[in-house]
Image (cartoon, grey):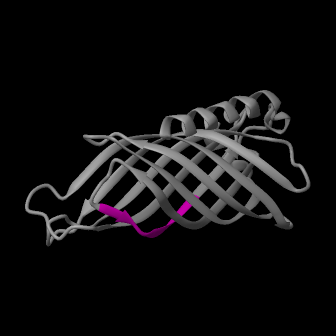
Amino acid sequence: MRYSLLSILLALLTTLTVFGQDSLKPTPFSSIRIATGGHSAPLVHGLNGWTPGYGVRAHGTTPFHWGDLEAAASWLPWSANEAELPDFYAVQISGAWSVSSSPLNAVRLTSGIALSNYFMVFDSEQVSGERKESEFVFSTFLRLRRQIFGSVQGFIQADAARVFTNPPFSMIQLTAGLSIKMESPAWIGQILK
């Protein structure tokens, strides 16, 4: 199931790449979209013994030649299901590339791929050894955005992620929130170029 979902998301990414006319050749770094929202991982496969809670996620997006560059950070607490296991929280730092469809009735579909670091900090009272772990993550995502008013949009995003722990585990992450778009100051564009 996890591989078929990844395949579907990658197929959608390819379709958006071909038909996402709105992503073709924008002016690099001309604007910044800042977003934040609630975050969860309702489907987890391969990480027995823990249940994810509810966290937060923020991301920033800017146009870059053909598509958008993104940077994101999320925080998610995990509770142990067994007394001998420690609770932990995870901080995920990501870099991503995405393409967006042209708007249809004020709704825009975005698809992308991301590489991340999944940094886990275990409860110090329950862990006798190393209490930190850092793992590589590959994910694909779909995001629906709808204009609410002005430059403010509401969004919902689904990520299919593979965390390369030993053994690896997979999860579907969901985020919903608000974003605002603003023009980049000229000095930011000059620094980023």
Against 47, residue 27 (above or below) is above
Residue at 31%, 62% (x, y): give it. 50
In the image, residue 106 sits, relative to residue 162, either above or below, namely below
- Left or right, 62 with respect to 47, comes to right
The answer to whether residue 51 is above or below residue 112 is below
Name the foreground residue: 43 vs 156. Answer: 43
Q: Is residue 86 left or right of residue 63?
A: left
Measured as percent of width and height from the top left, residue 61 is found at 66, 49
Residue segment shown in magenta? 50-58
Q: Quadrant of the C terminus?
A: top right
Camera-nearest residue between 158 and 122: 158
Q: Find residue 150 and report its horizontal and vertical position in percent.
A: 86, 66
Q: Residue at x 49, y 40 (%)?
A: 2
Q: Residue at x 9, y 57 (%)?
A: 129
Question: Which of the 4 image quarters holds residue 6?
Answer: top right
- Residue extending farthest to the left is 128
Tell me which corner region of the image, top left, top right, bottom left or bottom right, holds residue 136. top left
* Secondary structure character of the magenta stretch overall: strand
Residue at horizontal 75 percent and vertical 30 percent from the top = 15
Q: Residue 119's x, y, as percent?
A: 33, 53
Residue 62 in the image: x percent, y percent? Answer: 68, 46
Decide if residue 9 is on the left or right side of residue 51: right
Answer whether residue 79 is magenta in the image. no
View extreme (right): residue: 105
Task: Please state the total of marks drawn on the protein image.
Answer: 0
Looking at this rendering, what residue extends furthest in the front direction?
Answer: 1
Query: In the figure, 129 relative to 135: above or below?
Result: below
Query: 104 left or right of 15?
Result: right
